[in-house]
Image (cartoon, rainbow, N blue to C red):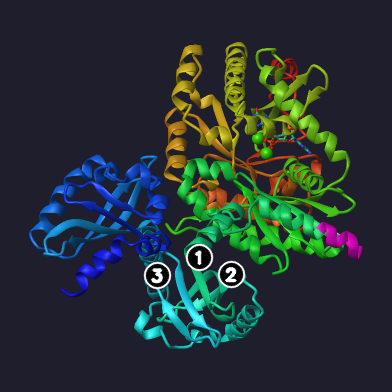
Amino acid sequence: MQSEPHLREALSSRHYQSLLASLNQVIISETLDGLVSSWNAAAERMFGYSAEEMLGRHITRIFPDDKLNEQKSIIEKISSGERLLQLRTVRLDKDQRPLHVMVTISPILDVQGGIEGIASIVESLTDLIFKEKALNELTKYKNNLASIVESSDDAIISKTLEGVVTSWNRAAEHIFGYTAEEMIGKPMLTIFPPDRIDEETQILNKLKAGEKVDHFQTIRLHKSGKQVHLSVTVSPIYDSEGNIVGASKIARDITEKLYVEKLIWRQANYDTLTNLPNRRLFMDRLNLEMNKAKREMHGLTVMFIDLDHFKEINDSLGHDIGDELLLKVSTRIRDCFRQSDMVSRFGGDEFVALMPSLNQRADIDHVSAKLLKKLNAPFTLEDGNMVYVAASIGITVYPMDGHTDQELIKHADQAMYEAKRKGRNQARYFIPAMQTSLDKHHQLGVDLRFAIQNNEFVLHYQPIFNLTTNRIEKAEALIRWNHPLLGQLAPMEFIPIAEETDIIHPLGDWVFKTASRQLKQWIDRYQLPLQLSINKSPVQFNMGNDVPAWQAFLQEIGLSGEHLIVEITESTMMAQSEVTQKKLLGFADAGIQVAIDDFGTGYSSLAYLNKFHIDYIKIDKAFVQDIKHDCSDLHLCEAIIVMAHKLGLKVVAEGVETEEQHRLLQSIHCDYGQGFYYSRPLTHEALEALLANSALVAV
Ligand code: C2E
Ligand code: CA
Ligand code: CA
């Protein structure tokens, strides 16, 4: 108590005033009524009010509205005996800006120990709050970071410069199969495949040099031993002094992505059915090899392989069997080539092969012959059926036959067409003359569309002689196209195009109707037991069923089906399905006979034909033309005739050109002969003249 009067003295002293003024702390005193009794320089600085402005004014001048009631509770607390009060609150400066402050309040006592007023020390909290805020943010950020690291799909790992793992997030656990406990403290090398151990030294060296490793693709091992493909980014970790103390590693599992990419690449470059490269990949490789051939001054060979009559097989046996066959065919084709060659499927039944180092004629011939031979062997399908296939092959050699990839392919394609036109099942080299023939091919396709309505087709008739009676018993209707520009075209020049464009259907109908009407006239006029043979394209035969329509037409014109023979080729029979059998039965029911044309050039055996309802076989002119005494073709023809007769079939020999052939055929009991020796195909007028002559007889 002794000191108190002394203090009071001191408080009022000038010395005290200057002390207050020089303090950096804001010290304010007020009466119990709240009137400011002292306001030091620091208070002036903090609040912007001068001492004059504040002395004697109510302290609540610096209180925000929502803090006004604080004054009452301060006075109450101090009055009730509290000696030290600390308050975190807000005050306003002269510009009404809020100031966050800590106010420490204590009573000012008079000599009797009664409370005279209060003194407040005011400290700004702005700095503190800022620091707190920053700290808060930092903790938040750290937590955030931790949760980002933990929830990341990428493995986030840190390691020392010695390669010892120091952190291992959840994704790392997932990607590599090791838990954090298992890995922390262990060498990073634990997950390295043995052949990639060197990478770790390289990575660590780079890091020590302060470099970053960016999106480096590599492989690490899962705990199970399974390979994991990764894209890795490794960056150095620095301490506060800027020394490199370790490395952080972000590793993305790209196993799936690589797999999908590979799949996409395969899908874009490979044929899904046969697994052979597709056109795109082939063209890439062709370009590569052409450049190489150019540099190294050698040639290369392209083979365009197109299956014969594949469309018919596909149409009649169904796409599943078609696919099965294509797969088997592709294996055989592949087997004819070397590993260094490329065999691709261009689509459908088109295969293209590239032989990068082959350009010797003899070698190419060897390959194409091998191909034809391999493909000609029967294919046994899963259902036990046998199918026969042949192919036409077009060949180009770089650089003679084309300077660009497109040219080489186009010309090989043209040569392949030529092989088809020349009778299929063979290989052709490209020659420049084929180019015009292809353009013609295209033009003919266009012209064909209008040819029927323009009446440009005519039928010629080639007599067929009975070799026992020497009479004309039958005639074969052979179509001709009187093309307005190109003159008369032989069927081989346009039938294949009609087959490709489906014009074969209306065309086949036209042939049938024209021949039937013609025959009806002749029969009515000459009362002859004449039969007409009509050729039916395999495409036409296999698509739909026109027997009912034909029957209706025959009825309409009053012609019996017995006067007609339909000639189909062996390839039509190749599609040895129930459908074929049914269709042939349909003809039989309509009284129409069936002949197998060009027998011997296809692949059917006589025993095989036995399954079908067939009346005649026509031995192809290729066999007939070479028959001489004591030659193998004669024996072959004889064997065919003997077997055919056993099966109840009659035999027609085609392409008989000489008397010798005629006699030999008679000697081996061939039933019918057809050929230039007897008669060329005739216009209907010429045949009619022959019939009128009633010759019907005699050569
Ligand atoms: P193909 O059915 O084998 O017809 C016989 C072909 O041999 C005819 O050729 C005929 O002129 C020819 N030829 C006849 N005798 C001899 C001979 O002694 N020596 C030689 N070297 N050839 C002879 P063309 O008229 O050029 O017909 C060719 C092929 O066109 C026919 O062969 C046939 O497959 C097809 N064709 C003809 N007309 C039609 C038709 O109306 N429809 C269909 N789809 N194809 C037809
Ligand atoms: Ca024929
Ligand atoms: Ca024939």
Q: Is residue 379 visible?
A: no
Q: Which structural element holds mark 3?
A: helix
Q: Quadrant of ligand 2?
A: top right
Q: For the N terminus, give its image quadrant.
A: bottom left
Point out the tag, 3 or 1, that comes first from the N-terminus.
Answer: 3
In the rendered image, residue 536, in percent from the top left (x then y), is placed at 59, 32
Residue sitting at x 78%, y 45% = 406
Viewer-nearest residue: 78 or 387? 78
Q: CA distance from mark 2 to mark 3?
A: 18 Å
Q: CA distance from mark 3 to mark 1?
A: 13 Å
Point out the frontmost of discs 3 and 1.
Answer: 3
Q: Which residue is mark 1?
A: 254
User: Which secondary structure class fits the magenta region best?
Assistant: helix
* Kind of residue at badge 2: Gln
Magenta range: 290-298
Q: Which structural element holds mark 2?
A: strand
Residue 194 in the image: above or below residue 517: below
In the rendered image, residue 376, in percent from the top left (x then y), is placed at 63, 57
Q: Which structural element holds mark 1?
A: loop
Q: Which residue is mark 2?
A: 217
